[in-house]
């Protein structure tokens, strides 16, 4: 079997109502869907987290010429060859996000070739269903009272839908952040609550907020400070009783080795469609396991990226096996997105707070070409 065609589809769509995290307002959603065609009639699909037009250019101008004519089942060999081929220019960022899409598509081809879901070829399943948490509760307006009314209703909606855990955004200043987190804790009772600053705090702000949130039973404090400052992460981790999370802006086992060696995070959150694909995410998970850190995948892509995350979740090690073992959660992006789920014939869905791992061949999903064409911008 040989690869005969590689096509990177850059997708983009406006959304009706913008929302904000600590870095900016979001008024459109994007996605990068990769299609790898073989001469056997099997097509593999991948997803990359990141700016789609730039990633598409990297794939089509640099990586695709190396892929044409290659055996798609030699995924690890191809991974190493591409990484090494652009090591001098691309150890992080867009280059690795582009490589992630290729790796995921090659896993999809491998699964379809052997008629097995990816997680079975990766040694699983360790689990066939995963509890999900809702990622949402973003700022909708700069009017605090109005925002609280909307986010309280949103949180209650997640509870009504069966979610037992959810995540909100902080990094808008101490008074605003603590008022929001207190309001949400009151609104959701004993459900799990996570907070994410998207590296929008400095160390002084992060410590003050962490201390004030300690009585509010916060499951983790995500990206409190800038990802480059591993010493800062280690310092805040020692300072607060709230578990510290991060890693969605870090790449490959090399970044995560440094994070883990520095004992900087309790929970690492590589994005499978950004850190180097399923191959690298599994290596990172094994590394986290040996360092006593939890691996909790970041998910923010199309339904294809979500399906890839589910395949990984099916094989993530259970950090400390036992009757009360902690299990990883699915990050279920619940924000507006015109094509995230529509892109698939049968998307991964959360029912009663739980998602089932797709068990069809490969990633276990089928792409709707009409939706792909509708939102394609390249
Ligand atoms: Mg985050």
Image (cartoon, rainbow, N blue to C red):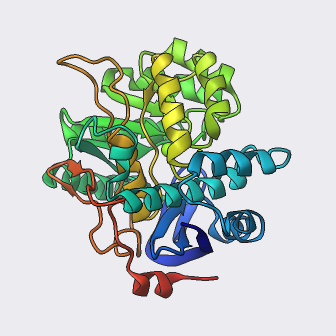
Whole-percent x and y of residue 71?
59, 60
Which residue is pictured at 35% across the width and 49% down the height?
310
- Viewed as shown, does residue 276 lie left or right of 196? right
- Viewed as shown, does residue 293 lie left or right of 146? right
Residue extending farthest right: 88
Q: Is 47 in front, or is 361? A: 361
Which residue is pictured at 67% across the width and 31% down the height?
254
Q: Quarter holding the C terminus? A: bottom right
Which residue is pictured at 68% across the width and 69% down the height?
68
Whole-percent x and y of residue 273?
53, 53
In this rendering, the count of numbered labels is 0
Whole-percent x and y of residue 213?
40, 26
Quarter location, residue 305: bottom left
Examine the rendering and report whether any part of residue 86 can be seen. Answer: no
Q: Is 20 in front, or is 331? A: 331
- Judge whether 127 appears above or below 90 on screen: above
Q: Quarter holding the N terminus? A: bottom right
Residue extending farthest front: 1
- Judge whether 117 appears above or below 204 on screen: below
Whole-percent x and y of residue 157?
20, 56
Residue extending farthest top: 238
- Viewed as shown, does residue 369 lie left or right of 8? left
Quarter location, residue 377: bottom right
Examine the rendering and report whether any part of residue 158 can be seen. Answer: yes
Q: Is 203 in front, or is 34? A: 34
Which residue is pictured at 32% across the width and 53% down the height?
117
- Judge whether 61 appears above or below 297 on screen: below
- Judge whether 22 appears above or below 242 on screen: below
């Amino acid at each position: 079997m040989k690869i005969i065609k590689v096509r990177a589809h850059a997708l983009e769509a406006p959304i009706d109502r913008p929302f904000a995290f600590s870095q900016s307002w979001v008024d459109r959603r994007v996605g990068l869907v990769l299609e790898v065609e073989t001469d056997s009639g099997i097509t593999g699909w991948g997803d990359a987290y990141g700016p789609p037009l730039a990633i598409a250019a990297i794939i089509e101008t640099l990586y695709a010429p190396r892929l044409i004519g290659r055996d798609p089942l030699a995924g690890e060999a191809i991974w190493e060859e591409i990484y090494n081929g652009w090591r001098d220019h691309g150890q992080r960022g867009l280059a690795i996000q582009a490589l992630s899409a290729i790796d995921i598509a090659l896993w999809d081809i491998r699964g379809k070739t052997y008629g097995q879901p990816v997680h079975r070829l990766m040694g699983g399943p360790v689990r066939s269903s995963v509890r999900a948490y809702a990622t949402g509760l973003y700022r909708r307006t700069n009017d605090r009272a109005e925002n609280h009314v909307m986010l309280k209703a949103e949180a209650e909606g997640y509870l009504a839908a069966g979610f037992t855990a959810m995540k909100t955004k902080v990094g808008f200043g101490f008074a605003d952040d603590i008022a929001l987190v207190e309001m949400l804790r009151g609104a959701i009772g004993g459900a799990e609550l996570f907070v994410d600053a998207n590296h929008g705090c400095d160390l002084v702000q992060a410590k003050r907020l962490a201390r004030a949130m300690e009585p509010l039973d916060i499951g983790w404090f995500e990206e409190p400070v800038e990802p480059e400052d591993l010493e800062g992460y280690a310092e805040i981790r020692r300072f607060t009783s709230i578990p510290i999370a991060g890693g969605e802006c870090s790449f490959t086992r090399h970044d995560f080795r440094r994070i883990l060696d520095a004992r900087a995070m309790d929970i690492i959150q590589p994005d499978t469609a950004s850190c180097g694909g399923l191959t690298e995410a599994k290596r990172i998970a094994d590394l986290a396991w040996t360092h006593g850190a939890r691996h909790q995948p970041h998910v923010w892509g199309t339904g294809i990226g979500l399906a890839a995350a589910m395949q990984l979740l099916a094989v993530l090690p259970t950090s400390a096996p036992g009757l009360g073992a902690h299990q990883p959660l699915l990050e279920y992006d619940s924000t507006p997105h015109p094509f995230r789920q529509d892109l698939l014939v049968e998307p991964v869905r959360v029912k009663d707070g739980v998602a089932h791992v797709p068990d069809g061949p490969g990633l276990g999903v089928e792409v709707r070409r009409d939706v792909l064409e509708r939102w394609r911008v390249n």
